Amino acid sequence: MGNADYEYPSIMNGESAGTGIHRVEIPPPQPFFKSLKNTVKETLFPDDPLRQFKNQTPLRKFILGLQYFFPIFEWGSRYNFGFFKSDLIAGITIASLAIPQGISYAKLANLPPILGLYSSFVPPLVYAIMGSSRDLAVGTVAVGSLLMASMIGNEVNATENPALYLHLAFTATFFAGLFELALGFFRLGFIVDFLSHATIVGFMGGAATVVILQQLKGILGLEHFTHATDVVSVLRSVFTQTQQWRWESAVLGFCFLFYLMMAKFFSQKRPKLFWISAMAPLTSVILGTILVYVTHAEKHGVAVIGELKKGLNPPSIMDLSFGSAYMTTAIKTGIVTGVISLAEGIAVGRSFAMFKNYHIDGNKEMIAFGMMNIVGSCTSCYLTTGPFSRSAVNFNAGCKTAVSNIVMALAVMVTLLLLTPLFHFTPLVVLSSIIISAMLGLIDYNAAIHLWHVDKFDFLVCISAYIGVVFANIEIGLVLAVGLSLLRVLLFIARPRTLVLGNIPDSMIYRNVEHYPNTNNVPGVLILDIGAPIYFANSSYLRERISRWIDEEEDKLKFSGETTLQYVILDMGAVGNIDTSGISMLEEVKKNLDRRDYKLVLANPGAEVMKKLNKSKFIETLGQEWIFLTVGEAVGACNFMLHSCKPKSTTDDASQKWSNNV
Amino acid sequence: MGNADYEYPSIMNGESAGTGIHRVEIPPPQPFFKSLKNTVKETLFPDDPLRQFKNQTPLRKFILGLQYFFPIFEWGSRYNFGFFKSDLIAGITIASLAIPQGISYAKLANLPPILGLYSSFVPPLVYAIMGSSRDLAVGTVAVGSLLMASMIGNEVNATENPALYLHLAFTATFFAGLFELALGFFRLGFIVDFLSHATIVGFMGGAATVVILQQLKGILGLEHFTHATDVVSVLRSVFTQTQQWRWESAVLGFCFLFYLMMAKFFSQKRPKLFWISAMAPLTSVILGTILVYVTHAEKHGVAVIGELKKGLNPPSIMDLSFGSAYMTTAIKTGIVTGVISLAEGIAVGRSFAMFKNYHIDGNKEMIAFGMMNIVGSCTSCYLTTGPFSRSAVNFNAGCKTAVSNIVMALAVMVTLLLLTPLFHFTPLVVLSSIIISAMLGLIDYNAAIHLWHVDKFDFLVCISAYIGVVFANIEIGLVLAVGLSLLRVLLFIARPRTLVLGNIPDSMIYRNVEHYPNTNNVPGVLILDIGAPIYFANSSYLRERISRWIDEEEDKLKFSGETTLQYVILDMGAVGNIDTSGISMLEEVKKNLDRRDYKLVLANPGAEVMKKLNKSKFIETLGQEWIFLTVGEAVGACNFMLHSCKPKSTTDDASQKWSNNV
């Protein structure tokens, strides 16, 4: 279809074109503090948490407040025996996973194994009172443990100075909790959102790879091992010590790994058999322990856990070393591990809440996680969160409320009080197998393939995180991925799309001519759609890009010789905001157009943009009659005016202005 | 107007609602490398610099290439005697400003005063060949000089170790040039755009304040002075030495300052008298020198410049100390001063180009600035750029081309060869007065007031830069302002506006109900406009915000008891892009709506969004019949379907999915 087909459809329902056009209103000025309040509210309180407190008696407000901070008061009153039966089964199931996993991850963090059990006792109780998820199972996580080992391990050697290392771990846990609490309290939870799905897939996969590589120490029964986590150092460490490899350990390790993988395979085939996979770690530990006890393999190169102290968590509040020289390390470790474990815990909580159709308040969850870690750091626990694997088992076992966490805590308590001696002969290699089997599930190559298909940039972010973690270290991987993700957001703003719009035949609709090739040009009118807010970061770009579009349109018209350009319409529908640099840009574009005797027309500016344009007097300069509600109406008015009146260029008072600045 | 007035206008030109609706097309898949090429081109070559090389003979291409890198070959052929007359006057005028300013700024940078003259000789010649601005006058700048003094001064004391300090200054200039050249060559000029107008106003004002405070040393004739630049240190330094204040120096200083300010005042009143202001610094220097020579005031506490070496720039290429221990300082200083001076130079060039309606290529300018500083660093010059004051004088004096820079360079050459002994008795206090008078023009409080009126956030950025520079140091001020500016961009993405749309009476137009209070609700349909791309950074927020809008709508409908909610339409017109986190968010919103028996409908998704939604199979899940080209058509279809067929909720296969991850 050529330009000759162009026909301007009337929308005015029989009215004349002059009077039926809709005015773009300038919003009434708001008092500064009111608009500030609105902005702060939308930014920090998008979920309007105080809504339910409106129009209530003071007593009711107090109860609602109590229920807000301690959700147990909310669901506790509705608790019944049916729920308890389900929670009991779920709690025992997750305890059977929690005990071996806890010990394994504590070893991964270079901490005494007993800390893994301690950490499955106190924090779940705190979460049960304060947490709002019904499905989250609390415990330590592999990535957090590894991060702690690598960050604190950079400063203090865990084998040479175990007491200092332990104190730093408690202090870091305390700061992680404090940071989480502060994020939640100041409603800054959106910081966690800056870890995108792609970042987390790549980061988790990389961390899992690193954790698996670390397990080579346990599987091969090596005594000396590198402290670095990158793949090159680890493989060099492994292959320079081929003499020290212990086959007994390796055989045992691979047998248990095979068993665990088979259990997982069956559970995946038949979801009802989830308990096979859930129980497998505990049965591995029991089998491995019996095997070592019977064969005395601990004397043949199979390392065992050894003595585990009986009794409940000792207090550790006096071990928090606030004045030490390693304070910065503790704070840094706390912040990094705190954010990472928050990201995991909140994502897990949200996912399950979505499945069961209930709501989770991210900021409230952060407060719960924060309190859990602060209390934990005072009771000999290290970093805990809501691990994905344990929560999924909890969900599949049919948990109803956070009581399953209480059941798990009680089961761990019984273990601590009575059963710790049984773990004396548990071979470390079984723990390594448990970790490897859990970590293999975190390397989500299908997700990476999906990212490649849907969004190449997300794939780049993901693979950068993976490569950064595996070949450099965990922090570099994270910084790389977050940096790339932010770069993308900034590039979206710095290089907004500008599209030429054309008329969709027989309608008032104007759309991108590349996306809809059957659109018609409007003779003498260039319509540009600006795809992002106009900020300092893109105002120079937009100025140049708009002028290039005009040049190209002029060339095209000159070539075809049909008409000359008269109007440039900017569709501001997607321009959510504008700053002073953006307004200067518009002023320059207008001056530039005036000089060429073209007229600038704006279509569909939003409330915020109108307010700013009004305050800066740009509307006066442009003339409010040149601002239209839709592109269609703007084109209609241009067609009406075309050839009947021509805009005049304004005179420059340049020398006046510049001489002020000499 | 109530809901009862709602009337659905037909757009179908007599056709039935089912067939006349426009389809949203899925763009055909593009090969990966083609789309990558397009993205890179739009990001790095928005001005399409190779356009003019298309369809040309090889010889013509060579000439065009030569003209591209050396614009003098382009305008040189059109040069005539009329231009030369104008350029000669302008060149002599700016030389009269350049000589005293050059000496003053070199003192500010703690460098030998002669360097200021050297720097007004070689760099203008380089720029005349390579630069594309016709109005820019090249020279040193106060802020760059001060930055250099403070950054290098942190490491090396200029009075104790002048040779090392000088070598570092040359090396820093070299790196500034190299960095500018690299930015231009790799077309990364947009980095400069991240210094917003508000940042520059605040930063320049702060830097000017700091520079003025530094001049108290010269005005009061103090010998010992703090090396810090913050206001507290400087004032403490001044007021602890009240005993050392020299009244002779102060009186002389204030007299000349008064003279300079009066000259400026007259020039501002009558733009034609610009030369009074332009000549004032040189006349001050001449008067001051004569005064000191006659009264022998140099023996009564008025410090003078002293011996200035005669002769042209000595080579300094051997002084570039690449191997030294202060290499990092030199590189850091080079990058910071390079970016700051680029920002000033390019802004100045662009402003004047806009006034005279010609085009400046930012990246080409960067290459010119870079070469100018690299050549400068090898010929005893330090950091140069296009200073605002000198360029404005050049413009007002009627320059036509860069030949005015050549004239200035020749005038400075004559001074260097013959006239340097005349500056022996020039009092330093006159130089301080010249600096103060120039700096007062940079404190642009009117611009700050304008920012406050138009955009409160820009004002915050501006004032943060000012306070940071004045109370802490220049770098902190800069980091603060850039950080805040970026935070705003990120917040725009992290907290996009979501607006409820209503129907504008008697039209197919749907707009924000708050902005247009006379809009009508569509019964049973909630229309939300999403105001930003859907990225990882806002997907959680949008999920919660959309669900809150739905809850509120439900409450409202329950209260009024009229109808129930059936459709949620998302207007995607402003959603320029979506990533995989965003798609997951849409999937979750859809599941959530399915569960409540509402139907999700999309209106007006762009090409990029359609492509991603198609690749991720979301279009299949949603059904392509639920994607419409406009909100109007979507509402039409909803009204058509309303009550006639209800969407069914899909079953969850949750347990299947989760057990995979245990």
Image (cartoon, coloured by chain):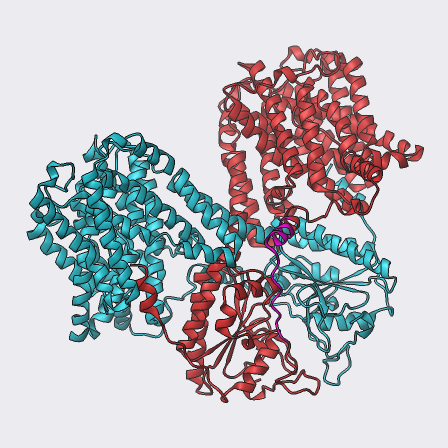
Chain colours: A red, B cyan
Number of numbered discs present? 0
**Nearest the camera: A401 or A1?**
A401
Residue at screen point 74% across, 59% down: B621
Q: Quadrant of the N terminus of chain B?
A: bottom right
The furthest residue to the right: A81
Image height check: is A156 above or below A480?
above
Residue A518, visible in the rendered structure: no
Q: What stretch is highlighted in magenta?
A: A23-40
Q: In which quarter of the image is the C terminus of chain B?
A: top right
x, y percent for residue B598: 81, 60
Is residue B416 rendered to the left or right of residue B45? left
Is residue B211 rendered to the left or right of residue A461? left
Residue B222, visible in the rendered structure: yes
Image height check: is B494 above or below A234?
below
Is residue A39 covered in magenta? yes
Image height check: is A244 above or below A540?
above
Is residue A7 rendered to the left or right of residue B48? right
Is residue B523 covered in magenta? no
x, y percent for residue B129: 22, 62
x, y percent for residue A302: 65, 16
Residue at screen point 72% across, 76% down: B21
Is residue A655 rendered to the left or right of residue A62? left
x, y percent for residue A568: 50, 76
Residue at screen point 82% across, 31% down: A404
**Nearest the camera: B90 or A324?**
B90
Quarter-of-image position of residue B508: bottom right
Quarter-of-image position of residue A444: top right
**Nearest the camera: A372 or B216?**
B216
Residue at screen point 46% across, 85% down: A646
